[in-house]
Amino acid sequence: DAKTTQPTSMDCAEGRAANLPCNHSTISGNEYVYWYRQIHSQGPQYIIHGLKNNETNEMASLIITEDRKSSTLILPHATLRDTAVYYCIVVLANAGGTSYGKLTFGQGTILTVHP
Amino acid sequence: DGGITQSPKYLFRKEGQNVTLSCEQNLNHDAMYWYRQDPGQGLRLIYYSQIVNDFQKGDIAEGYSVSREKKESFPLTVTSAQKNPTAFYLCASSIGQGLAYEQYFGPGTRLTVT
């Protein structure tokens, strides 16, 4: 799986958009970008994923650059409850064998939303 | 409500004792996973199971054992052979092939061994 690079920490004002970048310059054509977040002392929560096209759901939007070497997770109106560690993970589509379903969590980005 | 339950939330054991962590899901998911998280670190995969009566080692399986006798349950035993068992243990499940990476996590069990 391709390696990802994320900033260690970011701040965002409540009510503003939070834009979390992720670099995955070695991503291959059949690898997806997944985003999870982990609120302190809880289990991670799936947010969104994408392959090539931009994606949006009730939680966030995912913007993937045309060359797929980077992506941005957007929380349109951040709230205090969005304070968490955000993980960007690249996974191989339909991986079998020992890679099946394995999510490799790096250090992530600590997002702090302040009033 | 559908979800994953892990019990207990906090667990304390003496060194040399085996301990079993519970994980139950009522999401009708085929696949289940166990991860370990150390302070300030990401998650690491211990074991996973794609279907009942089948499971595979993850990256750090040494000192752990699992069983998958029922679709809903995937207990993890931390044996005395695990050198550094104190950690936050997370169980997850997913529908299965094609959506294996969209995993739902339980609240976790924080194990302290002294």
Image (cartoon, coloured by chain):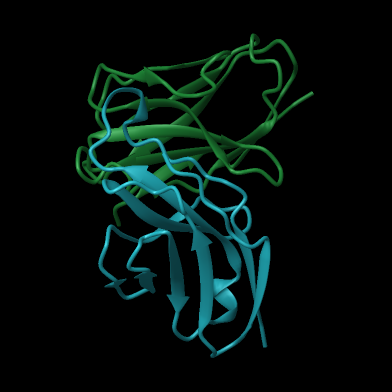
The single residue placed furthest to the right in the displayed view is: B114
Q: Write down the colour of chain A.
A: cyan
Whole-percent x and y of residue A32? 32, 51
Q: Is residue A34 above or below residue A2?
A: below
Estimate the x, y position of residue B60 in percent, counting from the top left. Answer: 54, 22
Q: Nearer the viewer, residue B38 or A25?
A: A25
Left or right: residue A91 compared with residue B9: left
Residue B113 x %, y %: 73, 25
- Seen at 22% across and 35% down, the residue is B30
| In-image side of B11 versus A89 (left or right) | right
**B43 horizontally vs A101: left or right:** right
> Where does the image place residue B85, in percent across and percent down from the top left?
67, 24
**Residue situated in front as seen by the camera: B14 or A72:** A72
Number of numbered tags placed on the structure image: 0
The quadrant in which residue B5 appears is: top left
State the residue lying farthest toward the front: A67
Q: Is residue B55 above or below residue B73?
A: above
Please tell me in which quadrant of the rendered image residue A70 appears: bottom left
Which of these two is toward me, B77 or A54?
Answer: A54
Determine if residue A5 is in view: yes
User: Which residue is found at the position 51% from the left and 59% from the top?
Assistant: A23
Q: Colour of chain B?
A: green
Q: Quadrant of the N terminus of chain A?
A: top left
Give the position of the C terminus of chain A as an image quadrant: bottom right
Instruction: State whether residue B111 appears in this view.
Output: no
Res B42 quadrant in image: top right
**Image height of B31 relative to B94, above or below:** above
Q: Residue at x 28, y 19 (%)?
A: B69
